[in-house]
Image: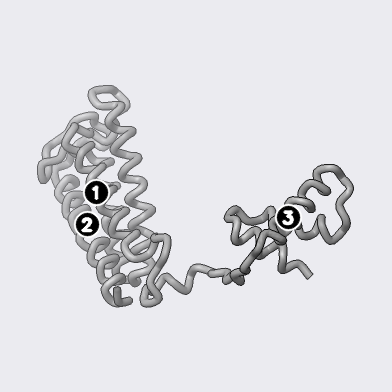
Amino acid sequence: MSTNRVHTVHRAGAAGLGGFLVAFGLAGLTLGAGFLATSGPIVMGLSTNGLLSTLSLVVGVVLVGAAVRGGQVASTVSVAVGTLFLASGIVNALVLDTSLNMLAFRMANVVFSLLVGAALLFVGAYGRFTVDLPASSPYARERTRVELPVHRTDGALERAMAAAERAVALHVATVDQARRVAAASAFRTAEARRAAFSNVN
């Protein structure tokens, strides 16, 4: 997974979806639909009004601008906008055919909003938000990796940890035991807890 490929996906995805939104917004504005009308003309298969057209134009310009700025900016903006699209789809599905439908949504708009939201999240997260990023990922350096030494144990360490934890619970722990238990409690995995417990100076 090369740096160029990851950033190209981010930028191309943001630019493509942003360009569509710009075209949709401009087309809607030229029709002169009421700004807050609960129903409006159909543009590119979607219902629109003045507010929705304006928002689409603004969001489209933001996405295209992010793509121009670079892959990392496009990734961050795509994730943020994608989340908003998903939320919009859910909220507007609840107000269809009511006076609260201020974006003139129809069911096609709801489906489109959910699909675009999912697409933007996928594009923005591509090669960035995974458990183990490859070294070639441009985002690998963003993660601080704490390397913990691996300790072999024959049970003595576990017994010492258990004794220290009991002593702390009974309020009879030594200063050293208390420090080691406190250090270990900051970790969840058994290996990390053993390493933290044994590495206290």
Three-letter residue code for mark 1: Val
What secondary structure is found at the residue carrying circle 3?
helix
The crowd level at tag 2 (other Cα within 10 Å; few <14, some 14-19, many 20+) is: some
Decide: is 158 above or below 147.
above
- Give x and y (percent) for residue 12: 23, 66
Of marks 1 and 3, the one in the foreground: 3
What secondary structure is found at the residue carrying circle 2?
helix
Residue visible at 34% across and 52% down? 81
Tell me whether circle 1 and circle 2 mark residues in contact (CB < 8 Å): yes
Specify whether 152 is left or right of 197. left
Which disc, if any, is residue 159?
A: 3
Residue visible at 18% across and 55% down? 20
For disc 2, the marked residue is 17
What secondary structure is found at the residue carrying circle 1?
helix
- Give x and y (percent) for residue 123: 28, 59
Decide: is 4 above or below 197.
below
Residue visible at 80% across and 59% down? 179
Tell me whether circle 3 and circle 2 mark residues in contact (CB < 8 Å): no
